Amino acid sequence: MLPGILWYSFIILVPVCLAAYYGMFDWAGGTNKTFLGIQNYLDVIKDPVFRQSLGNNIYLTIVCLAGQIGIAFILAVMLNGRHIKFKGFHRTMSYFPAVLSAVVIGFIWNMIYDYHYGLLNSFLKVIGQGDLAQAWLNNDKLVLLLVAIPLIWQYVGYYLLIIMSALSSVDPQIFEMAEIDGASGFKRAIYITLPLIKNTLIVCVTLCIAGNMKIFDHIYAMTGGGPGTSSSVMAMYAYKTSFMSYKMGYGSAMSIIILIVSLILVAGSRGLLLRFGKDKEV
Amino acid sequence: MKRKMKTAALLMAGILTVTGLTACGGGDDAKAEGKKGAGDGIELTVSHYYLQEERESNAVGDSYLAMVEQYEKDHPDITVTQQAMSQSDYSTKIQAQAAVNEVPDVFMVKGSWVDNFVENGIVAPINEYLDKYEYKDNFREGVFDAATRDGQIYGMPNQMSITSVVYYNEALWKSIGYDSFPDNWDDIYAAAEKFQEQGISAIALGNSEKWAAESCILSTLGDRFTGADWTNSIIDKSGTAKFTDDSFVSALERLQTLATKNVLNPDFNTITETQGVEYYSQGRAAAVVSGHWSVAAIESFADEETIKNTKVAVLPSEDGSKPESISGGCGWYFAVNKNLTGEKLDAAMDFIFSTTGYEMCEYAAKEHGLMGAGLVEDVDVSAFPQLTQDFIALTNELNFTPVYDLVMDGAVIEVMNTGIQDLLNGSKEPKDLAAEIQAEQDKLK
């Protein structure tokens, strides 16, 4: 146990504490540092770009919660039914995007959204809606939704696998009895499946929130946070502040704030879901 | 059987330990010998971003590496250890090394980092050695500016970046009634409409990496509005010039009209600078505003016909006069670690003068037709491709004004570049962007 704790503290706790310490300085990288106290932390909270990035993270989290877990749940229930053929094939194919690296996903979807060669614009032209064709990722109102779609596409298979393994542990007789009693597929999903795999879903929600709080590489590959800061997320803004603007102290402070915000959101949502689940059981 | 296995395992472990030990011992011996071999010489570690495998396509890199090879030949007693990596990797690594004051003996510094490196005592001034350098007077004006602080010069410039040349397809412009690239903006706006009817754009821009609009267009436009004094005041952080001044706001307004008047390709914010040059090479755009690097790019992307039709020009001036300047200058310098002393310091200084000084400019000019920090006379350009010759002829007549991202503070540039994407999109007003950039400038000491 002790070596594990030592190792853990060395690679996790020490860097976090150091970042918190560096966050108290005006530091551009170098031997000179000016002590500022908590000024950097206060500035981060007031920084409009940071607030916008946090908002974008939350938006992506909500869209992905609905998209990734929602679609995965529907697919899992369908695949669990008796009428579907080639279940293994469907399962493998839907998991396939999850094994691709984020940069590959970024490039694939960049090609889809491309102005000249993109599938989306070609499709619009084929169906006679060529006027709608545009440089999609340059549309600052749509860009967040457009980068969320690849995220959903990639991770549906991942959550599908988790939910299916939970479903397989449910006694099939329960479903048969419900069917005999005349419950429709929709009713079975809502009143039987959902409560029985509640704990697994809570794990999925936690994973989804944590994953979306640290999202970086997909967006970096697709838009770089642009146009302007429209698709900027917290991790990307921290990276740019530290390594492009050379404000290492400010960037460190930002990282610590991201850590705190993420912990609050993950812990908060977990607590809320657990309490909500208990009330229902009583 | 079990016991036998155990014995065998022990034996194996024993063998491994012994061989392992001897291997280590051997290593130490070899190391000691290696040191003795070069014992009377000096070891220099040099870090840069010129990769051996990119030599073919990188003229500056080839010139530099050729100079290093020559230096190694001339100085057998000095061991040069090169650490080469890509430019973005290099930038990250050197910043990290600077943070703990462990930079190599010789390394590259960008103009916008000089303040930080000087304050932290990482770079050594080269004045004393430059004064003794035989080709001291052969350098162009202003090439040391970005590396000069309080009269001290902190590096040798090794490349001249010219960032704002208009490459245009003469045949396409003739087809809509212009003999050459227009010398006023109204004609460009009018031409853009005609090109749009043909389904192409007048000027290609690839700004997804965010630097192209600022580095290639705004740096030149800005100077036309603000003049050099304004830019220098911003660089000095003296506070007399502000980004919110009317002149700079007007420059931003001019930049914005490029997008609002549909002069640019609609996907300017989603393609890279290289893709922008490709658009031009493929005939999707009638012109592109880009730097010296695009001469080679156009020669390799475009077909014979397009290359033959490609001519060079400059962006129009605001008052209708003949433009005399474009953005260009030295932004990267080879610097020496401040911790070096004695013989090693002399060797490192000698190394940067030999590999990035006048001889390198001469080699680059004669081998690649490349303009360097030093003025090289009597270069026979007739053997180069026509486009290279045109480029040299055009740039020889011009003066150079600072390239914003090479000389202004990195944080200010980051705000400017990010905001320009919004500006071109029409989602940010020039005045508001100017205020944001000034707010970042105000944070500097």
Image (cartoon, coloured by chain):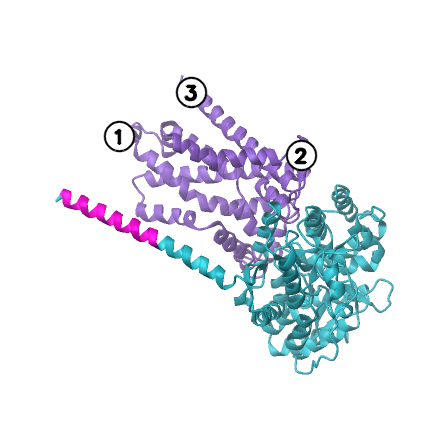
Chain colours: A purple, B cyan
**Mark sitting earlier along the chain (2/1):** 2
For image coordinates 39% across by 28% down, the residue present is: A199
Which label belongs to residue A173?
A: 1
- Amino acid type of the residue tagged 3 in the rendering: Lys
Residue A82 lies in the magenta stretch? no
Quadrant placement of the N terminus of chain B: top left
Q: Is residue B26 left or right of residue B302?
A: left
The one nearer the camera, B222 or B373, is B373
Q: In this view of the protein, can residue A201 be seen by the observer? A: no
Q: How many marks?
A: 3
From this view, report whether residue B22 is shown above or below residue B308.
above
Residue B19 lies in the magenta stretch? yes
- Amino acid type of the residue tagged 2 in the rendering: Asn
Q: Is residue A279 left or right of residue B5?
A: right
The span picked out in magenta is: B2-22
Which label belongs to residue A278?
A: 3
For image coordinates 29% across by 40% down, the residue present is: A82
For image coordinates 67% across by 34% down, the residue present is: A40
- Amino acid type of the residue tagged 1 in the rendering: Gln
The one nearer the camera, A190 or B213, is B213
Residue beneath label 2, please? Answer: A40
State whether the magenta stretch is mostly helix, strand or loop: helix
Spatial CA distance of label 2 from label 1 is 59 Å
